[in-house]
Amino acid sequence: WERPDAIPFRQRLLVVANRLPVSAVRRGEESWSLEVSAGGLVTALLGVKEFEARWIGWAGVNVPDEAGQRALTKALAEKRCIPVFLDEDIVHQYYNGYCNNILWPLFHYLGLPQEDRLATTRSFQSQFAAYKKANQMFADVVNQHYEEGDVVWCHDYHLMFLPKCLKDYNSKMKVGWFLHTPFPSSEIHRTLPSRSELLRAVLAADLVGFHTYDYARHFVSACTRILGLEGTPEGVEDQGRLTRVAAFPIGIDSDRFIRALEVPQVQEHIRELKERFAGRKVMLGVDRLDMIKGIPQKILAFEKFLEENSSWRDKVVLLQIAVPTRTDVPEYQKLTSQVHEIVGRINGRFGTLTAVPIHHLDRSLDFHALCALYAVTDVALVTSLRDGMNLVSYEFVACQDSKKGVLILSEFAGAAQSLGAGAILVNPWNITEVAASIGQALNMSAEEREKRHWHNFGHVTTHTAQEWAETFVSELNDTVVEAQLRIRQ
Ligand code: ADP
Ligand code: G6P
């Protein structure tokens, strides 16, 4: 028995993200099943345990009827999730349009798709209006559930307007905003027609966080160059009010992966995979099927490696697991067919009647299957063209206790700043370099693999999702006080 006053105080945290950690699938008029959503934001936030957290977000499904909304709200409440219901038109304009056809490629330095550029420019205003409307809808739900003393933590490029909407409701609300993608150079950001409005809306937050110091610096430069505000070592100042800006590199719940390797079902899976690929080195790619992940470039580099190293052709296999994502956005549809075409061509070229060099799966794997795959992998290929952090690289490292496999990592992933010394860093656009690094990884001595592994493992197990969240929230709590002190001075 514990005295009530001995129960530690757990601060209530309202986590607001476009995507809830579970996505809903309708089974009947009032019956729903919930599936874990894929993506780095969800993975990291699931590792955060020390708070009394409520999630507010979209369940990934259109629910036009009230009975369905009531039933889903109830089902989600058991997971401490609160839904924001977005209708089809808003999803089309805000999520598919402004978020994933404009902000996402821009923040990853991919620009806009050439042939759609004029059409995109024409629909820009209506998409931006839908973006603001959607952010206001999130703010309304937060406001309904907010209690004094709560901390509100807004996430990602979908919700850049949210800090402003929340502060308009209640200027005392503690509001933090964290970006899970890169923030690009101010020269890229300034091409966005809504550049100033977005920056000002983010600056309404008390604390603004990024994965790396570079992204934070780009954001501060955008505020100084585009808005003419003053950048200080702590953040951005506007008429005496400070918005603190800092880097908070994200991590994973590494213990969850390490523990999973002991689960009998995972061990059985590992045995099966080892048997299936006996005599061959296993290379692995795990990505959402997204342009930023550089999947076609990665596969072409593997083809070049096979071309130049005929003795490896029957001794290595590439497993590429790519979960489909944002399938209503045309660019993503094109990518799927492009990847299928390249894989088919290479398997036709180098496959035999009994074996193919590339196994490509368009699907999500469950957690245990994923851990088993990481554990049997000799070389992981994370070759994103740009990536905020990339947690797949962390997950691979956490599962490498027995293999001490090699990580080939893009220098354009945020993770290159933390795992750079342990990985082989590559420029993913340079297919020749990536092909050569595959050879280097496959031929690396056990001693060197071990040394690199321990470097990475040390980082992944000490810089966890839990630590990331605690640091952010504790700075957010302090920052508000600091900012008020500054105003009073
Ligand atoms: P992003 O945030 O762009 O999705 P990250 O690498 O940071 O990229 O995070 C991706 C997350 O999604 C990881 O936790 C990874 O395990 C999960 N994931 C990606 N692809 C798959 C897949 N095919 N099956 C299962 N999980 C996946
Ligand atoms: C990235 C983004 C997240 C997003 C995830 C999955 O990790 O930073 O905000 O949730 O991709 O994408 P989706 O569009 O399916 O939510």
Image (tube, rainbow, N blue to C red):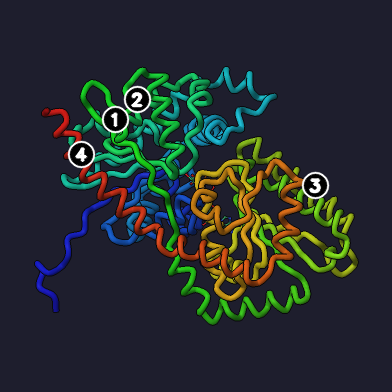
Give the label, 3 or 1, closer to the camera.
Answer: 1
Residue denoted by label 4:
480
Among numbered discs 3 and 2, the one appearing first in the sequence:
2
Residue to which mark 2 is pinned: 200
Rate crowding at label 1 as few (under 14), some (14 to 19) or many (20 or more) other CA atoms within 10 Å: many
Q: CA distance from mark 4 to mark 3?
A: 53 Å
Looking at the picture, which amino acid does disc 2 mark?
Arg
Query: Which residue corresponds to mark 1?
Result: 204
Residue 15 in the image, given as x and y percentages of width and height: 33, 48
Q: Position of residue 3 (x, y in %)?
A: 10, 73
Q: Looking at the image, tell me whether mark 2 or mark 4 is earlier in sequence order.
A: 2
SS at mark 4 in the image: helix
Q: Are marks 2 and 1 in contact (CB under 8 Å)?
A: yes
User: Depth-wise, is mark 1 or mark 4 nearer the camera?
Assistant: 4
Residue 77 image label:
none
Q: Residue at x 47, y 32 (%)?
A: 90
Q: Which residue is mark 3?
A: 341
Distance (Cα) linking label 2 and label 1: 7 Å
* Residue displayed at 66% across by 36% down: 331
User: Mark 3 to mark 1: distance in Å?
Assistant: 46 Å
Horizontally, residue 127 falls left or right of residue 407, namely left
Q: Earlier in the sequence, mark 3 or mark 1?
A: 1
Residue 481, above or below 115? below
Most foreground residue, 216 or 165:
216
